Image (spheres, helix red, strand yellow):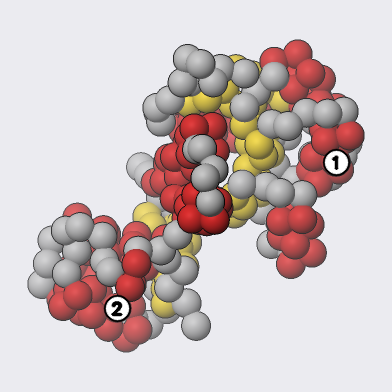
Amino acid sequence: MTESAGTIDVLVVDDDFMVARVHRTFVERVAPFRVVGTAHTGEQAIEAVDALRPDLVLLDLYLPDLFGLDVISRLRTAGHDCDVMVITAAREADAVRGAVRQGVVDYLLKPFDYEDLQPRLERYATQRGRLLTTVVRGQADVDRVLAGAFAPPAGGALPKGLSVETAQLVERALREADGTVSAAEAATAIGISRVSARRYLEYFHATGHADVSLRYGTAGRPERRYSRRA
């Protein structure tokens, strides 16, 4: 563990070697995270946690020898208190419920890109910092820790730099889209820059009002496509 140094040590667990390498690259772009190891099976993950004592495990559920939730159970039985962020293609409601019962800090569906993982890691780092430093004097302190970085803005206020009027335009573009819409398409439809459109679309995604999918082309990065969540 590296609490005194402020670094958050991470173990990446995925059965696909290339995917694990990509996830490692994503994590190491976000301060103060540091990848201390990778594992490709459940047994390797358990042994790596024993040896490396990471603060956070990025865990795929579909492993060749063990289901990811069983890995978490064995880690807890062995006395390990590392946090776990599930990163998986498992969309079954039972898997999500089981992960929540196991106390995972987040659950991110594949496929995803860096922009999906980055804010989750940053929120986790903020929440972890609160847990490590909070002095509980009353219920307000407990509520503040439990809400942490995941609490929505008070009164539904938009983040700084976003306006209600433009948010309504972007929401309408989402609502009227035939299927999904890209940031560039939304920007053209309502007359704002692509960067601005993406900020609003990512806000809707972060607050649960929009879904994101990735469209892969023949070259370059995949295109993020947004759709209004029913």
Q: Earlier in the sequence, mark 1 or mark 2?
A: 1
In the foreground, 16 or 104:
104
In this picture, residue 189 sits left or right of residue 74: left
Q: Residues within 10 Å of mark 2 (few under 14, many from 20)?
A: many
Report the mark closest to the observer, 1 or 2: 1
> Is 127 above or below relative to 176?
above
- The amino acid pointed to by label 1 is Ser
State the residue position of label 2. 171
Is residue 75 at all visible to an observer of this figure? Answer: yes
Q: Is residue 132 toward the left or the right of residue 122 in the image?
A: right
Left or right of residue 206, residue 71 in this image: right
Residue at position x 37%, y 55% from top? 223
Q: Position of residue 105 (x, y in %)?
A: 61, 47
Q: Residue type at mark 2? A: Glu
**Outermost residue, front side:** 137
Q: Is residue 205 above or below residue 5?
A: below
Above or below, 169 against 50 in this view is below
Q: Which residue is mark 1?
A: 73
Residue 101 rendering spot, x and y as whole percentages: 77, 55
Residue 167 location, quadrant: bottom left
How far, Cα to Cα, is label 1 from label 2?
41 Å
